[in-house]
Amino acid sequence: MITSMLVLLAVLALGLSAGALVAEGAVLVPFWRSLQPESFLAWYRQHATLLLRFFGPLEIVAASLAVVAALVSWLGDEPASGLLAISAVLAVLVLAMFPLYFQRANASFAGATIATTEVGVELRRWSIRHWVRVVLAIAAFAVAVVAARKGHDRMTYLKRLQQAHRIEVNGEATYVAAAGFARHQDHRAKWQVLAKLETRMKERLAGAITSLGDSAGERKVDVRLGHAAGALLASLPWRIMLRGLRVVTGHTTRFFQRLESEHPEGDASLLAYLTAHERAQCEFAKRELEGNGEQSLEPVLKLLGAEEGAKDSHRGVSFGQCRHTSPTSHG
């Protein structure tokens, strides 16, 4: 769960950063070059701080998320970790170009320390180097998109189950930590129920993996990342956390739907329950956001109270807007 969320956030941040740099090169730079040197220097002096406050954090956040996503993916032995590493390197190169050239050039514009006769030449040089970082930024974004899609590519059935098991280990640790850090008793109780659902799913997946001749160990990195994520979730305002949870569980629901679709040879009951349990969490977030807190856990409790026949429990729960009817429509 955490890896998927980080990759998604990295893709969004890299896309925003690349788009902002393209806009700067396509709109601002031609405008600057159309001005007389004195007018350009006066304009830049007035807006230099605003430009730095906008573009600086955007590039720093994009590069940081790309690096974290690549590191977590590598630690988790994810199939797209190599591509994410390439994306991270490209994003860091974009960031590194600022101290290597743009910081000095921008300071000369803001302080009007450059001769007016040199402004045109320097702006041309600035434009060329800016488009170099635009290409790097677009490449970082494109590689991250490919990496995100590769994470959903077809795997062997066992590999998919192992990946799903890691997600459940992480999810269980996340909810347990969130319950521990929760400030309200009502929230703590709900986190504990969600943790119980993750535990149930984790155990079923472990049994399926063992039946296929492999072991289903729990890696410390997945547990620790879950504990960190749980502490973060507990610290967020309840509604903001719910919106994030709904996005993440919707994303993982589609992942589990793909598992169902791509592996008809697998345990149909297990796979149906796997998708249903994720939908139940999505529905929990949806109902909470709609102000229906008293019945938000109903889908989760129905699954926990159901017998082992996952198909029957799946039919017995209404998931409203959290139902995705086209498993192959995403990624």
Image (cartoon, grey):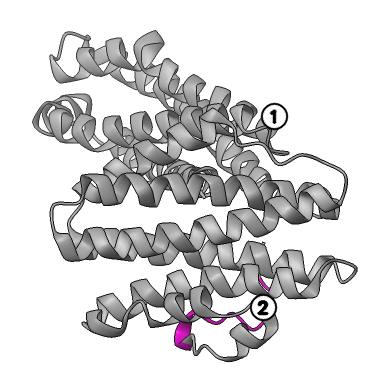
For disc 2, the marked residue is 310
Secondary structure mostly seen in the magenta stretch: loop
Instruction: Report the side of 294 relative to 197 (left or right).
Output: left
Q: Is residue 326 magenta?
A: yes
Residue 187 at x, y = what percent?
22, 62
Which amino acid is tagged 2?
Ala
Residue 327 spot, x, y in % from top left = 70, 74
Q: Where in the figure is residue 62, as x and y percent of width and height?
A: 41, 35
Instruction: Specify the label residue 82 is tagged with.
Output: 1
State which quadrant residue 147 falls in: top right
Res. 311 visible in picture: yes
Front-most of 217 and 222?
217
The segment highlighted magenta reads 320-329
Q: CA distance from mark 1 to mark 2?
A: 36 Å
Q: Quadrant of residue 289?
A: bottom left
Q: Nearer the viewer, residue 199 or 130?
A: 199
- For the C terminus, give its image quadrant: bottom right
Residue 73 location in percent, x, y? 60, 34
Q: Secondary structure at mark 2?
A: helix
Callout count: 2
Question: Is the residue 195 above or below the residue 70 in the image?
Answer: below
Q: Amino acid at mark 1?
A: Gly
Residue at position x 37%, y 32% in the image: 59
Label located before the other in sequence (1 or 2): 1
* Residue at position x 44%, y 69% in the image: 281
Q: For mark 2, does the 10 Å Cα neighbourhood hold few (<14), some (14 to 19), or many (20 or more) residues?
A: many
Left or right for 134, reference 104 = right
